[in-house]
Amino acid sequence: MVDSKPGTVVESYGRRVLVEAADGETLPCTLKGRRLAVVAGDEVRIEKGRGSDDWTVVDRLPRRNALSRSDSRGAEETIAANLDQLCVVVAPRPPCDPFIIDRYLAGAAFAGIASLLIVNKVDLPIEKTELSFLESFAGLDLPTVQVSARTGRGLDALKEVLSGRRTILAGQSGVGKSSL
C-alpha cells in the first residue's frame, strides 16, 4: 500500500524540495518524472512507496496564482505560487532602484496578488533624497509598514499584516529580507 498525503512546497532546490504536509510535518521529497516542476507555495500530493522512507512529489495541484519573471532568455519563469501577498522591502541603504519596486508591483498586480511596501532600517539616519522616490507610490493606496529589524520597531504591525497570509518578501540585496 502506498502512503499518500497533501502538502505545500516550502523550499525548492531543483529536483529536491521540502514539503510541509497537511499534518504540519516538513518532509524532504524528490520530484517524480522530469516534467513535474514545482515552486515554493505549490500545493502538491506526495507519496511514500512500499518499503521506503523516502517521499516523492507525484502531482502538483492547480495554482490559484503564480508570480513570474523573465529569465535571461526572455522566457517566463515562475518563482512562487498560491500567494496572498507580495511584500516589497526597501531601505535607505543600500540605495534602492525604484524600477525594481515597479517590476515587483506590476508582477504582483498581473498575477492578482495583493502588495505591501515594507520600509526597513528606519532606525538609520535617513537623508532626504534616500527614500524620496516613495512619494510617487503614495497615490497608489499601497499599504506601507515602517520597521527596523535591528531594534524591533514596527514588527508587531508587520506581524499583524502577515498573519494568516502566504507571503513572499522581495527586494534587492541588503535591504533586510532575511533579518525580517
Image (cartoon, helix red, strand yellow):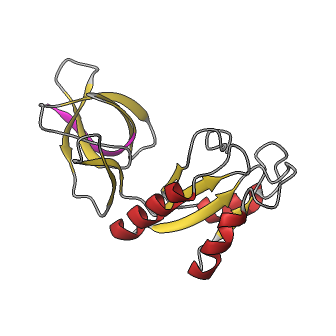
Q: Nearer the viewer, residue 39 or 2?
A: 39
Tell me the residue at 44%/36% (across/down).
25
Q: Is residue 121 left or right of residue 104?
A: right
Q: Position of residue 56 (x, y in %)?
A: 23, 30
Q: Is residue 68 left or right of residue 123?
A: left
Measured along the vertical axis of the image, is residue 134 above or below residue 54? below
Dominant secondary structure of the residues highlighted in magenta in the image: strand
**Residue 59: quarter of image:** top left
The C terminus lies in quadrant: top right
**Residue 117: quarter of image:** bottom right
Total marks shown come to: 0
Q: Position of residue 44 (x, y in %)?
A: 26, 46
Q: Nearer the viewer, residue 41 or 164?
A: 41
The N terminus lies in quadrant: top left
Measured along the vertical axis of the image, is residue 122 above or below residue 19? below
Check the image and name the residue furthest to the front: 129
Tell me the residue at 77%/49% (across/down).
121
Q: Which residues are drawn in magenta?
A: 1-10
Tell me the residue at 58%/53% (across/down).
97
Tell me the residue at 29%/43% (across/down).
71
Q: Check residue 55 for magenta coloring.
A: no
Q: Check residue 5 for magenta coloring.
A: yes
Q: Nearer the viewer, residue 91 or 37?
A: 91
Q: Position of residue 29 (x, y in %)?
A: 30, 28
